[in-house]
Amino acid sequence: KQEVTQIPAALSVPEGENLVLNCSFTDSAIYNLQWFRQDPGKGLTSLLLIQSSQREQTSGRLNASLDKSSGRSTLYIAASQPGDSATYLCAAVFGNEKLTFGTGTRLTIIP
Amino acid sequence: GAVVSQHPSRVICKSGTSVKIECRSLDFQATTMFWYRQFPKKSLMLMATSNEGSKATYEQGVEKDKFLINHASLTLSTLTVTSAHPEDSSFYICSAPREYGYTFGSGTRLTVV
């Protein structure tokens, strides 16, 4: 069964610190992996998409990596800000065009 | 670009009534639309996949007669929750695959009282 897991479920970090969010998946035959942000009661905002042929993608203070052999992806956030507080979800496509979502990490940046 | 507009954003209905949720692709043609459900503090669970001009494909455990999906055009997919009950209260969200990832609607918060 193809599963996506995110640990920890919640994380609190002082403002200004760099942080890493983790995402694990069980099937190395991944097509692509996408990181999303979800604010309370809101929809999803796409942050970064990594194709299976890529190892990382960067956008501003965000950097996402993909290691298929170990079944891991990370989202690195530099110089965290209170506005970064949200739930971060990773989702993988395993070839059937369907997104399989992780359980999410609720991030709180402490001013 | 690649915007999916979802309406309504929030709806409260009485038990036994039906509610329709719409997702429109504003600047592209969506031949496929995924419908998800999200319980509080939980991740998104795929309910069904709608394809323009054909019957929707439902995930295991999802009642097709309760969650009616219609994808009659390349720009509109609808989810109708029929004979709603309080346990149907949830956050529903649609998504369309794009060349570079997926684009999501803004979600609909359904509360059945």
Image: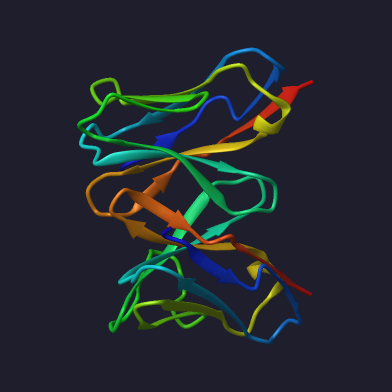
Q: Is residue B3 left or right of residue B7?
A: left
Which quadrant of the rendered structure holds the N terminus of chain B? Answer: bottom left
Total marks placed: 0
Picture residue at 31% right of the left edge, 81% below the top: B55
Q: Is residue B32 left or right of residue A54?
A: right
Instruction: Give me the residue at 48% from left, 65% from top.
Output: B4
* Residue found farthest to the top: A17
Q: Is residue A102 left or right of residue B33?
A: right
Please give left or right for residue A23 compared with residue A10 in the image: left
Colour mapping? rainbow
Q: Compared with residue B60, is residue A93 higher up or lower down, i.e. above or below?
A: above
Residue B34 image offset from top left, x and y in percent: 40, 64
Q: Residue at x 61, y 16 (%)?
A: A79
Location of residue A34 (image quadrant): top left
Q: Nearer the viewer, residue A71 or B104?
A: B104
* Residue A50 vs residue B82, the one in the foreground: A50
Q: Nearer the viewer, residue A4 or B4?
A: B4
Q: Quadrant of residue A28?
A: top left
Residue A71: percent from left, percent from top: 31, 26
| Quadrant where the C terminus of chain B is found in the figure | bottom right
Q: Position of residue A24 (x, y in %)?
A: 39, 28
Q: Quadrant of residue B87?
A: bottom right
Q: Position of residue B52 (x, y in %)?
A: 31, 79
